[in-house]
Amino acid sequence: MTDFPRSLLEFQQRFPDEAACAGYLRQLRWPEGFVCPACGGTRGWALATKAHTHECADCHKQTSVTAGTVMHGSKLPLTVWFWAAYLMATHSNGISALQVQKQLGLGSYKSAWLLCAKLRRAMVAPERSPLAGLVEVDEASIACRTKDDPPAGGGGRSHQGKLLIAGAVEVGDGGPGRIRLAQIADFSARSLHAFLAVNLAPGTTARTDGWASYPGAPDLNHDPRVVGAMAAHIVLPWVHRVFSNLKTWALGVYHGLRPQHLQAYLDEFVFRFNRRRTRHAAFRSILAIGVAITPATYKMLIAPETQG
Ligand SMILES: [Zn+2]
């Protein structure tokens, strides 16, 4: 499927109004035609009196094209959602909520932040497949920003003010393939094995620096490259480059990441990295995932750590 705008001008011509955006969402959500979310019925009609809403011929439930999606219940026009998705997907480094607020002339920072947070949830495809083949794996810490901290954060070696992350990079012919990043509680075998189990397919070869927590991860081949005197960035060049790019990006776009939203920003970085050569197609991906996942409440978005 290659149905997405390839330039700003094309975007503007393609999505001038609510009806054009709704039509695009309908295609993404019901490519084979309307399906009633209540009874599974496929017969229905568009209502003339309610915007972007279908009524089921069998159970008569009325369903808006955005009902039950990431856009559920939003008061923002669809055109604003589309612009935000386009800016987040195509801007080479991503875009902060403050920039989105200014660019789209939104009334409050809060609504811009929520818009971005909801779109960020649409950057993890529910059915994405785990990494496979040869994969570099390493762990790192990243300086975090607290309420009182200056945005740049301080140096220092303690883990205070630091967030721990695990990273994995597929290594193909002379370059990196897809990546995964996750926040972890510590560098223990339990935490790292859990990361590997979720993100690496069985049979994958995990190349590590030989850290004691890696051996014994089930269903994987372990390829420890004991670093010794050799710097880790030489034996694991790609995962180190990813960590380094992540830190630069976090400071440049967000002036440092906050602990309570770390995983969401890691997900955004992964989404952007894995689509670095197909940014315009990424716009379509965000909306396609957005209509396939369930909506998040305000509480879930502001305090994701309270979720199970
Ligand atoms: Zn129905």
Image (tube, helix red, strand yellow):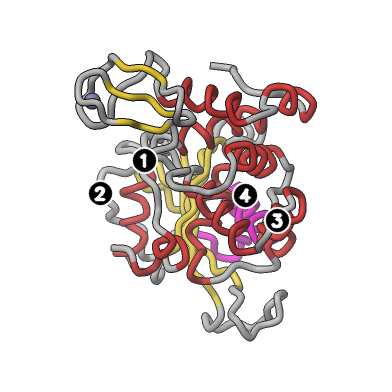
Q: CA distance from mark 3 to mark 2?
A: 46 Å
Camera-nearest label, 3 or 4:
3
Residue linked to disc 1: 68
On the image, the x and y values in percent for residue 181 come to 49, 53
Closer to the camera, 136 or 93?
93
Q: CA distance from mark 1 to mark 4?
A: 42 Å
Residue linked to disc 4: 237
By secondary structure, the bulk of the magenta-drawn segment is best described as: helix
Q: Quadrant of the C terminus?
A: bottom left
Indicate the amino acid at tag 1.
Gly
As drawn, is 13 to the left or to the right of 199? Answer: right
SS class, disc 3: helix
SS class, disc 4: helix
Q: Residue 6's quadrant in the figure?
A: top right
SS class, disc 2: loop
Sequence order check, earlier mark of 1 and 2: 1
Indicate the amino acid at tag 2.
Pro
Q: Which residues are magenta?
A: 226-249
On the image, the x and y values in percent for residue 216 come to 27, 55
- Residue at 40 percent across and 53 percent down: it is 296
Indicate the amino acid at tag 4.
Pro
Camera-nearest label, 1 or 2:
1
SS class, disc 1: loop
User: Is the residue indicated by label 1 positioned so its CB lies within 8 Å of ligand 1?
Assistant: no
Sequence order check, earlier mark of 2 and 4: 2
- Residue at 40 percent across and 71 percent down: it is 186
Sequence order check, earlier mark of 3 and 4: 3
Whether residue 246 is in magenta: the answer is: yes
